Image (cartoon, helix red, strand yellow):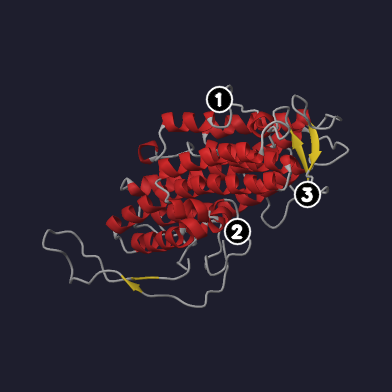
């Protein structure tokens, strides 16, 4: 359970107060305030903190392969961490190994299948002693920073980033979306019986959604140590403004639940559902800008990294717990993947995307701009928003 000191509460008065019941017999909603920090009674998001810690450690284990000469990473160890078996975590007060939680169980089905393949690939490719090149797996160094190394697949995929983005969206984003989809559908979870330390079932469910976001209780005032979704929310904040939108909706929705204001809860859940997907899309745009910067610096290896990161974001656009509210269509998703590699959209060759020895910087940037513009069209981003990401 989080134990944070909170300086202040405050201020948004919800509706006026009626006496006992409305004329139609529905219980009246009392006037209530929405705090400025996630400082509610009986909040427990401990499981979400443990899952974030597990994801961090798995990511660190994968990163061990990004060294030269090659450092072999055992895929069986990575899969054990993913499934939380055989005590693979560096334990702490969170007691991860004995938590009964696993990243695998919390991932959506499609993300779980990808993760197993990705982790196995890291183990396999980390055995290579060759330098990375088109058609050959291996480690390559950034030309701008020789200490920054990347284990690349034969097609130039930097699995370290793809794995992290799959966890970000196939687990944390998916589960947060699942909470909000149920809340937006006017779920009937118990909101009467209080469990000390957890609140009602409905309150606890919403608190889990907050935990998946990966922020301190006074975000965005405090934006240190942000994890996964929240980290990228901060990064795309200049163009999207998602920090305040998501946090305010989390605060208002939780206050509404505690005061049985279900219409407000439904509205806030819908806002969060939409904004999660939009921040994911904005992150793709951001990675295109970073890819352009890497191309300008003549750093094709770093470009494979940012393109891999963007590919992880793109694949995450369809990890949606509420398909009916998803913004991107299956057809648009397929077309977006084609922009990476029309001959093999499901597993693009990023060497062909960059091919710095053949393509000019302008030609490569035309490809990144095509992806940027496609995202903008699907999500209704303005030219100013696209430029600001």
Closer to the camera in the image, 234 or 204: 234
Residue lying at 56% horizontally and 74% vertically, measured from the top left? 5
Q: Residue furthest top?
A: 343
Look at the numbered discs 3 and 2 and tell me whether their residues touch, using CB distance below 8 Å. no
Q: Left or right: 176 with respect to 84?
A: left
Q: Around disc 3, counting alpha carbons within 10 Å, would you say few (fewer than 14), some (14 to 19), or many (20 or more)?
A: some
Q: Nearer the viewer, mark 3 or mark 2?
A: 3
The reply to whether residue 37 is visible in this rendering is yes
Q: Residue at x 11, y 62 (%)?
A: 23
Q: Are marks 2 and 1 in contact (CB under 8 Å)?
A: no
Q: Earlier in the sequence, mark 2 or mark 1?
A: 2
Identity of the residue furthest to the left in this view: 23
Q: Which mark is residue 144?
A: 3
Q: Residue furthest right?
A: 69
Q: Which residue is mark 1?
A: 342
**Which residue is labeled 2 in the image?**
226
Query: Which mark lies nearer to you, 2 or 1?
Result: 1
Q: CA distance from mark 2 to mark 1?
A: 36 Å
Query: At 49% across and 39% down in the image, what residue appears?
Result: 317
Q: Position of residue 46 (x, y in %)?
A: 57, 55
């Amino acid at each position: 359970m989080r134990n944070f000191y909170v300086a202040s509460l405050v201020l948004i008065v919800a509706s006026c107060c009626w006496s006992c019941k409305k004329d139609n017999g529905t219980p009246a909603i009392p006037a209530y305030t929405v705090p400025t920090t996630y400082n509610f009674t009986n909040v427990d998001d401990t499981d979400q903190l443990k899952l974030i810690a597990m994801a961090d450690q798995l990511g660190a284990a994968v990163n061990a392969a990004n060294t030269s000469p090659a450092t072999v990473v055992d895929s069986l160890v990575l899969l054990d961490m993913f499934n939380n078996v055989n005590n693979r975590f560096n334990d702490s007060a969170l007691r991860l190994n004995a938590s009964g939680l696993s990243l695998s169980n919390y991932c959506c089905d499609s993300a779980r299948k990808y993760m197993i393949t990705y982790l196995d690939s890291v183990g396999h490719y980390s055995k290579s002693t060759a330098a990375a090149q088109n058609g050959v797996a291996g480690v390559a160094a950034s030309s701008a920073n020789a200490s920054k190394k990347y284990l690349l697949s034969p097609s130039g995929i930097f699995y370290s980033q793809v794995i992290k983005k799959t966890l970000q969206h196939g687990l944390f984003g998916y589960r947060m979306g699942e909470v909000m989809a149920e809340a937006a559908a006017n779920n009937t979870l118990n909101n009467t019986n209080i469990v000390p330390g957890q609140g009602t079932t409905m309150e606890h469910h919403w608190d889990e959604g907050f935990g998946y976001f990966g922020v301190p209780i006074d975000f965005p005032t405090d934006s240190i140590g942000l994890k996964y979704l929240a980290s990228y929310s901060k990064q795309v904040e200049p163009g999207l403004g998602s920090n305040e939108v998501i946090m305010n909706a989390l605060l208002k929705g939780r206050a509404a639940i505690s005061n049985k204001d279900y219409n407000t809860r439904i509205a806030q859940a819908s806002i969060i559902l939409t904004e999660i997907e939009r921040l994911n899309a904005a992150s793709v745009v951001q990675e295109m800008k970073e890819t352009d910067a890497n191309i300008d610096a003549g750093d094709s290896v770093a470009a494979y990294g940012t393109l891999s990161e963007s590919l992880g974001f793109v694949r995450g656009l369809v990890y949606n717990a509420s398909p009916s509210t998803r913004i991107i269509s299956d057809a648009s998703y397929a077309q977006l993947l084609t922009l990476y590699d029309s001959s093999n959209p499901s597993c693009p060759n990023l060497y062909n995307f960059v091919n710095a020895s053949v393509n000019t910087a302008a030609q490569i940037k035309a490809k990144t701009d095509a992806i940027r513009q496609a995202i903008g069209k699907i999500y209704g981003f303005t030219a100013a928003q696209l430029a600001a990401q």
